[in-house]
Image: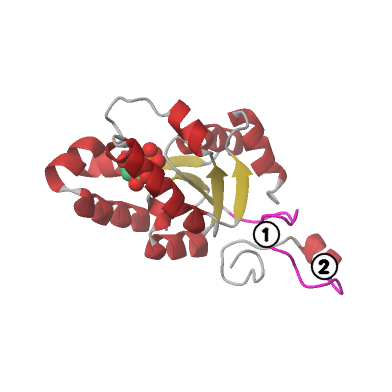
Amino acid sequence: MNGTDSCGTGWAPSGAARRRLEGEPPPVPARTRRLPMRTDKIYLVGFMGAGKSSVAGALGGRLGWRVEDIDDLVERRERMTVADIFSRRGEAYFRRVERSVLAAQVPVRHAVVATGGGTYADPANRSLIDRDGVSIWLDVSLTQVIERLPSDGRRPLAADRAGMTRLFRDRQAAYRRAHVRLDAGAPVGEIVERIIDRLDM
Ligand code: S3P
């Protein structure tokens, strides 16, 4: 929807912002527009190493909201690490569980959800997220991803550098559809403040 139509998306400009818009030219996309957002659910999306989990923890603490992490929920449900799920059951199985734990989060309100790097790249997940709350893309550069990701084997899709680079490029178009884009290169505290600035609490 990219801010051109706020109906039924779970967020909306405040009354004051809406009044300010009256009589103005057609709206520009949400990520360039500085309108407040009203929501009780925030999804952090973006590539591995963007800092989604760290920002979710800090933002949830600041708002007094629940913090949920899709990878943690998958691991708890399966009683296995993400790396083990990939190697023992395969990626398709991981994606099914990921979809299911995401759907189970819909009734949870006043929550910040850190998604996995692939969650928002899936069209069905993306439409669920964008109907349920505000999606915030933590936009990280490939250089930063490479600097940030430890080679600890916890991220199966980061093991092969060429494959990861392809994945990074392929997913940009999906991430770009998020309601809001923020530069993930900024310190966590600053990202949190930028999000709070844009929330109509
Ligand atoms: C994945 C990213 C990981 C995890 C899994 C698959 C991906 O999450 O969900 O390894 O497809 O990009 P993080 O983005 O939290 O590392």
**What kind of element bears circle 2?**
helix
Residue 107 place in picture, x, y as percent: 42, 57
Q: Is residue 35 magenta?
A: yes
Task: From the image, tell me which residue sits under label 2.
Answer: 21
Neighbours of disc 1 within 10 Å: few (<14), some (14-19), many (20+): many
26 and 61: which is toward the camera: 26
Image point 36% across, 54% down: which residue? 102
Residue at figure coordinates x 70%, y 51% from the top left: 200
Residue ID for mark 1: 30
Query: What is the quadrant of residue 49 in the picture?
Result: top left
Quarter holding residue 78: top left
Provide the residue span drawn in magenta: 22-39
Identify residue type, mark 2. Leu
Which residue occupies 68% across, 49% down? 199
What amino acid type should be assigned to the residue bearing mark 1? Answer: Ala
Q: Main secondary structure of the magenta part?
A: loop
Residue 197, x across and y down, in percent: 72, 43
In this rendering, position of residue 36 left or right of residue 118: right
Position of residue 172 measured from the top left corner of the image (x, y, whole percent): 49, 52
Viewport quadrant of the N terminus: bottom right
Give the structural element (helix, strand or loop) at label 1: loop
**Which of the pair 156/107 is nearer the observer?**
156
The residue that appears at 27% across and 29% down in the rendered structure is: 153
State the separation of the CA atoms marked 2 and 1: 13 Å
